[in-house]
Amino acid sequence: MFPPTTKILVVDDMPTIRDLVKNQLRAMGFKNIVEAADGEVALNTVISQAAAGTPIELIVSDWNMPKMTGLEFLKQIRASDQFAKLPFILLTSESERDQVTEAIMAGVSQYVVKPFAAKAFEEKLKGVWAKVSAAG
Ligand SMILES: [Mg+2]
């Protein structure tokens, strides 16, 4: 599993969902969580945190957001040499189910369909960590 010190960026336009995700992550033992309300702010956060020497190590992002969607954010991240391998989990809703293939093609590490139980979310995180650690 990701170490408790892993720096995690939680992105969602709904504060209640951000709180929910943060609480689930904290309950799993994660202590280093930052947040953003849309893809544009999130992308700037990824860039500025890396520049500050405190890089984001895992992204958990909503799909449907104003200004920049989670899918567009994912594509920007994967298009960057610096962040191409950054673990990226998308939170999707039923309405995006048909577009999940596009997210997989774009290189999403894993996706979670809302609403999700904490246990299911933790299993997805473990799966992503297994891939990340296998890749070295
Ligand atoms: Mg949303």
Image (tube, grey):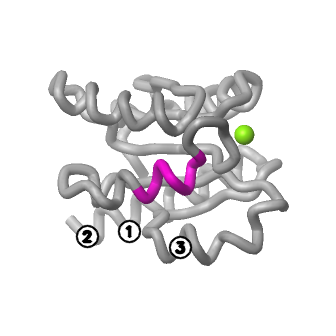
Residue at the spot 40% in from the left edge and 37% down from the top edge: 43
What is the span of residues highlighted in magenta in the rendered image?
Answer: 69-75
Q: Position of residue 52 (x, y in %)?
A: 18, 22
Closer to the chain start, of discs 1 and 3, is 3
Question: Against 1, is 67 above or below?
Answer: above
Question: Against 101, is 40 above or below?
Answer: above
Q: Which residue is mark 3?
A: 104
Residue at the spot 55% in from the left edge and 56% down from the top edge: 71
Q: Which kind of residue does numbered mark 1 sit on?
A: Lys
Relative to residue 127, is residue 99 drawn left or right? right
Question: Against 27, is 98 above or below?
Answer: below
Residue at the spot 31% in from the left edge and 60% down from the top edge: 79
CA separation, marks 2 and 1? 6 Å
Closer to the chain start, of discs 2 and 3, is 3
Q: Which residue is mark 1?
A: 131
CB of mark 3 near ligand 1 (< 8 Å): no
Task: Look at discs 1 and 3 and give the one toward the viewer.
Answer: 3
Q: Position of residue 38 (x, y in %)?
A: 57, 33
CB of mark 2 near ligand 1 (< 8 Å): no
Q: Position of residue 73 (x, y in %)?
A: 47, 48
CA separation, marks 1 and 3? 15 Å
What secondary structure is found at the residue carrying circle 1?
Answer: helix
Which of 12 and 126 lies nearest the eye of the viewer? 12
Q: Which residue is mark 2?
A: 135
Relative to residue 45, is residue 14 drawn left or right? right
Q: Which kind of residue does numbered mark 2 sit on?
A: Ala
Question: Against 14, is 123 above or below?
Answer: below
